[in-house]
């Protein structure tokens, strides 16, 4: 069945922002009087939904507090870069008439800023930020846009993305250049695995 719609995760999928996200998280740690953790530990322990990660280190932190502190911190760190080949692939997908949507836990205003900086904002039918429950959001998107689940693909770089896509009934693709290794991603049993965005063309063909 031909894919007509693609939903992308943002961080670690289209945006090479691990360093920026780590820096922002450590600013939150500092603001709350917590000792920072290493980048290696952060990458190893980071998980979604994001409050699972935060409450492992700061049990008393509420989602409302985290959202506010992180939204402030993410504007104080280095600006991330777009992964190589992303803009070219989005152009190709758009030329084929494929609907392209983004969902991300990233604060919406920062998400829009990065999309504009990357020069890719116009390729998306929708940009959805501040998402905590990706299952709910994927279901909402498919229903609102009348997308057939089996003609809809969700691409992400962590096991939670794959789990969310499966629960929502869409085709799942694990992308290997982001926050988690191929070995970790394969534990979630994605429908497909690609090492980088350039491999998407072969997969869709």
Image (spheres, rainbow, N blue to C red):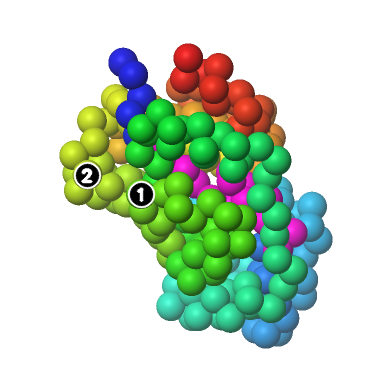
Q: Is residue 174 above or below residue 191?
A: below
Which region shows up in magenta?
A: 6-20
Residue 108, position as x, y percentages in the image:
45, 67
For disc 2, the neighbor class at 10 Å (few under 14, some 14 to 19, many from 20) is: few
Residue at the spot 45% in from the left edge and 47% down from the top edge: 123
Residue 93, position as x, y percentages in the image:
46, 33
Going from the N terminus, do you reach mark 2 or mark 1 first?
A: 1
Q: Is residue 43 left or right of residue 90?
A: right
Q: Which mark is residue 147?
A: none
Residue at the spot 70% in from the left edge and 55% down from the top edge: 81
Specify the quadrant of the image occupied by residue 117: bottom right
| 128 within the magenta span | no
Q: Which mark is residue 125?
A: 1
Q: Which mark is residue 145?
A: 2
For disc 1, the neighbor class at 10 Å (few under 14, some 14 to 19, many from 20) is: few
Secondary structure, mark 1, is loop
The residues tagged by marks 2 and 1 sit, at their Cα atoms, a distance apart of 10 Å
Are the residues flagged by discs 2 and 1 in contact, CB closer than 8 Å? yes
Q: Nearer the viewer, residue 169 or 51?
A: 169
| 10 within the magenta span | yes
Q: Is residue 125 visible?
A: yes
Residue at the spot 52% in from the left edge and 18% down from the top edge: 203
Secondary structure, mark 2, is loop
Q: Is residue 35 above or below residue 79?
A: below
Q: Nearer the viewer, residue 86 or 103?
A: 86
Q: Is residue 65 left or right of residue 32?
A: left
């Amino acid at each position: 069945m031909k894919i007509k719609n693609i939903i992308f995760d943002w961080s670690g999928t289209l945006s090479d922002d691990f360093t920026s996200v780590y820096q922002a998280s450590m600013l939150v740690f500092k603001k709350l009087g917590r000792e920072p953790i290493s980048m290696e530990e952060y990458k190893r322990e980071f998980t979604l939904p994001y409050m699972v990660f935060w409450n492992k280190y700061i049990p008393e932190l509420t989602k409302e507090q985290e959202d506010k502190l992180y939204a402030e911190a993410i504007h104080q760190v280095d600006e991330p870069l777009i992964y190589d080949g992303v803009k070219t692939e989005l152009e190709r997908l758009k030329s084929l008439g494929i609907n392209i949507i983004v969902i991300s836990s990233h604060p919406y205003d920062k998400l829009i800023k990065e999309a504009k900086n990357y020069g890719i904002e116009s390729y998306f039918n929708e940009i959805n930020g501040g998402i905590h429950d990706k299952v709910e959001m994927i279901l909402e998107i498919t229903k609102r846009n009348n997308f057939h689940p089996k003609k809809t693909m969700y691409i992400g770089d962590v096991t939670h993305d794959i789990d969310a896509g499966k629960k929502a009934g869409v085709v799942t693709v694990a992308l290997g250049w982001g926050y988690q290794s191929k070995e970790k991603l394969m534990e979630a049993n994605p429908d497909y695995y690609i090492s980088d965005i350039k491999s998407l063309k072969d997969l869709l063909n």
